[in-house]
Amino acid sequence: MVTHVSGSVTSRERYLRFDEFGGAEKLYLDSRDASPLRADQLRVRVHAAAINPLDLRILANGPQAKIYGVTLPSGSGNDFAGVIAEVGEEVSEFAVGELVFGEARLRAHADVVVVGEQDIVRVPSGLSLEQAGGLNTSGKAAIASVASVALTELSTVVISGATGSVGLLAVQLARAAGAKVIGIARASQHDLLRDYGVTPIDSEGQLVTQLRSAAPEGITAVLDYQGAETIDAALELGIPAQRINTIAAKKHRTNEGVQTVHGGAERPAVVAALAEQIARGVIHFPVDSTFPLEDFSQAYARLDSRRARGKIVLAPTR
């Protein structure tokens, strides 16, 4: 038996797919018949689904495509938020009409996703669906990477890519732990970092020189959300490799002990407490822009510009 909302599920569903690897130009909007629902599954009408740099790496047939077992043709996206439209008879924790967010690897950029109970979390009051639809991947990465370097009030941590969706969460989690934070970002984004109590340095400048000047007392940890240059600068400054964690350059100098903790294998439940903090305004999680699903090309162009201040979200249902 399946419980459902009358008229909430159509026989055809739109979704983004790609038939060959490449750039965002390989994506196109297709439609398919609604898939059957097993007794232990839920059908969620998607209202918001973020796009992430990870989506582009998978599309480009990067290492992540192998990690996630991509076979062609494939759907796209992971993070989503929406309303439960149907539940199978074995589902016990959720009900039709509840707002939820979570993950559906290679399936989230669609009108509808079918998931299990373990794949979703309720949207807390005060958290917008756009925020919820972009939180899973960024939230897990920020939580796991910050935890990997065990920050305290005695720590001075460098965070590269500090104004990206993961970086901005990590900045706030690091500050909440009492750490002094040095953020690497473009000069145009330095005022934003100062608003969060962060000492900014220019990502287009000479990193080693700038870091020595910003932290004459020394640096205790590095969180890299930008790329190999941050890792090289940190090692040149004598920061122990095990105190460096990267999610942006996972093969760079890891043989020397650089960590690659990112939280990707964790279930969405790990971000539940973070979602509550965002809902209460304790943690800020901005949404840069929202695009209709059919305008996905514009959304990916915005992501590729690297000028977004917050999450970029697709909105299949308005």
Image (cartoon, rainbow, N blue to C red):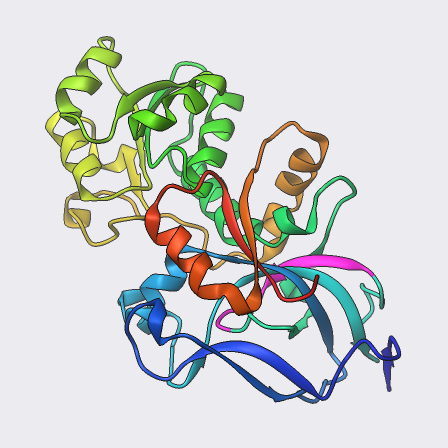
Q: Which residues are magenta?
A: 98-106
151 and 251: which one is in front? 251
Question: Residue 117: horizontal and vertical position, in percent?
Answer: 70, 67
Question: Residue 26: horizontal and vertical position, in percent?
Answer: 35, 75
Q: Is 232 left, or right, of 155 in this rendering?
A: left
The quarter in which the N terminus is drawn is: bottom right
Residue at 66% x, 46% y is 272
Residue 104 visible in the current orientation: no
Which residue lies most toward the top here? 217
Residue at 57% x, 49% y is 135
Question: Residue 107: horizontal and vertical position, in percent?
Answer: 54, 73
Question: Residue 84: horizontal and vertical position, in percent?
Answer: 77, 67
258 and 171: which one is in front? 171
Relative to 79, does residue 218 appear above or below in the rendering? Answer: above
314 and 214: which one is in front? 314
Quarter holding residue 298: bottom left
Relative to 295, does residue 17 appear above or below in the rendering? Answer: below
Say if the magenta span includes residue 103.
Answer: yes
Say if the magenta span includes residue 27.
Answer: no
